[in-house]
Image: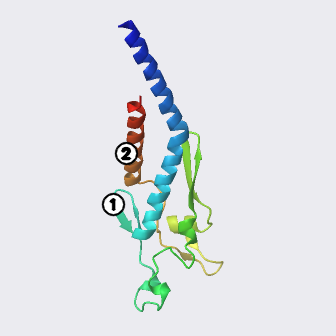
Amino acid sequence: MARNFKLFAGDIRRKQKEIAEYIANDAPRHVGKIAVDHFKLGFDNEGFTDATLKRWKEVKRRQPPVRKGVAGKRKILQGDTGDLFSSIEFRPERRRTVIFSDKVYAQVHNEGLMAGRKGHQFQMPKRQFMGPSMVLDENIQKRFNRDIKRIMNKI
């Protein structure tokens, strides 16, 4: 009986160590991938998903009279190059993940700030593509639960 308890206690300590290692090293990479995928999906959906999808304000180029060619059909915030979409990245760190865009205009679009040059400024409509999200949190939690369960069930 005492021997079984010692084996069980040793297993628990090993599992605890594996979980701590997962949280410190693997989880930040998983969070980054899930978050970047979530935020990029918003570009396809033309809106930001927190609890539900909140669609972005329509762009003038797609309102009557609709521009001819690709510009009249292109998705919101896609631009000619798709640079903003492509700029969403993550940097895993120990026990945390940093999600970012290196584009100087990303914050202007995301928060709806003033844009333009001196004398020709205008208020950019808020078209949030990054930020706290209930759906994102749920997806991360599902991944954590699955990974922790895998660790616990491993022999």
Does residue 108 appear in the picture of this structure? no
- Cα distance, mark 1 to mark 2? 18 Å
Dividing the image into 4 quarters, which one contains the N terminus? top left
Residue 66 to residue 30: above or below: below
Q: Position of residue 49 (x, y in %)?
A: 39, 61
Q: Position of residue 135 (x, y in %)?
A: 37, 54
Q: How many marks?
A: 2
Question: Is mark 1 in CB contact (under 8 Å) with mark 2?
Answer: no
Q: Secondary structure at mark 2?
A: helix
Residue 79 to residue 7: above or below: below
* Residue at the front extreme, as displayed: 155
In this view, the mark in front (1 or 2): 2
In this rendering, position of residue 33 left or right of residue 134: right
Say which of 64 and 81 sits in front: 81
Q: Which residue is mark 2?
A: 142
* Residue at the top extreme, as displayed: 2
The way the protein has been coloured in the rendering is rainbow
Say which of 112 and 96 sits in front: 96
Q: Amino acid at mark 2?
A: Lys
First reached walking from the N terminus: tag 1 or tag 2? 1
Q: Position of residue 10 (x, y in %)?
A: 46, 18
Residue, x 39% and y 69% (percent of image)?
45
Residue, x 40% and y 37% (percent of image)?
150
Q: Which residue is mark 1?
A: 52
Residue, x 47% and y 60% (percent of image)?
39
Q: Amino acid at mark 1?
A: Thr
